[in-house]
Amino acid sequence: MYQYELPRYLPTADELPCSDDTPVDNELQELIPSLLKSILRMLWEDRMDWFFGIDMAIYSDPEQPPIVPDGFLSLNVERVFDENLRLSYTLWEEKVTPILVLEVVSTKPGGEYTTKLQEYARLGVLYYVIYNPKRRRKARLEIYQLQNGNYELQTANPLWMPEIGLGIGCEPANYDGLTREWLYWYDENDRRYPTPYERAKLESQRADLESQRADRLAAQLRALGIEPEVP
């Protein structure tokens, strides 16, 4: 729960800048969180108590600049306010701190291991995920868990997060026509959840197999002199 001393007047999200006006300089900064969000939409399509923001400003104080992670997940919030959607994420309106934040390190590091780590710990973000494609003196994937006010680096890949009911990790696969390492959600047995494309492909294959089975059955009936019923 978000609790800080704030000014008497608290602006709404509509009254605040919705970005820090810093463009992303790495295509993965968009693709990786977008993939995670698309899988969540499929897994939690019937739930309306979660929100996944991408490159969205998080305000903890209206008099201070926002912090803008590449992606973040909040639980127990409204998934959709209205048709205009969220402009930014203001903690005094939402009343809920994101439970997970994702930073994808670009060619120009932006404090992911220093100032942002400290800020997310101050806000009380439970899981902080850093993905470093270049792996310059750092592990490609680092997942931190907040323990007693400080982040502790976790070693599992994927890491099961019981507070979310999901695991997160990385592995090589094909997405958006590109075969490389991507971040994915996992179940508690470390099985990766499919992407929407993968699920659609599996469902198409099942439908083809069912159609082939029906055709074989119809042929067998006709061989016995029985005309199968047409649905």
Image (cartoon, rainbow, N blue to C red):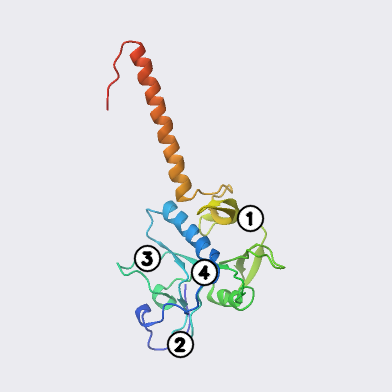
Q: Is residue 49 left or right of residue 144?
A: left
- Marks 4 and 2 in Cβ contact (< 8 Å): no
Q: CA distance from mark 2 to mark 1?
A: 38 Å
Q: Secondary structure at mark 4?
A: loop
Q: In the displayed structure, would residue 41 be above or below residue 129?
A: above
Out of 5 and 157, give the one closest to the viewer: 157
Q: CA distance from mark 3 to mark 1?
A: 30 Å
Residue 88 position in % (x across, y down): 41, 74
Q: Is residue 129 above or below residue 219?
A: below
How far apart are the alpha carbons under marks 4 and 3? 20 Å
Precedes in sequence: disc 2 or disc 1: 2
Question: The residue tagged with tag 2: helix, strand or loop?
Answer: loop
Label 4 to label 1: alpha-carbon separation: 20 Å
The residue sitting at 35% across, 20% down in the picture is 218
For label 3, the residue is 78
Amino acid type at mark 2: Glu
Q: Mark 3 is on which residue type? A: Glu
Answer with mark 4 or mark 2, whichever residue precedes in sequence: 2
Front of the two marks 3 and 1: 1
Q: Amino acid at mark 4?
A: Asp
Which of 52/30 is in front?
A: 30
Tags 3 and 1 in contact by the CB under 8 Å rule?
A: no
On residue 63, the disc is 2
Residue named by callout 1: 157
Mark 4, other Cα within 10 Å: few <14 / some 14–19 / many ≥20: many
Tell me the number on the disc at residue 70: 4
Spatial CA distance of label 3 from label 2 is 25 Å
Q: Which label's residue is closer to the chain start, 3 or 1?
A: 3
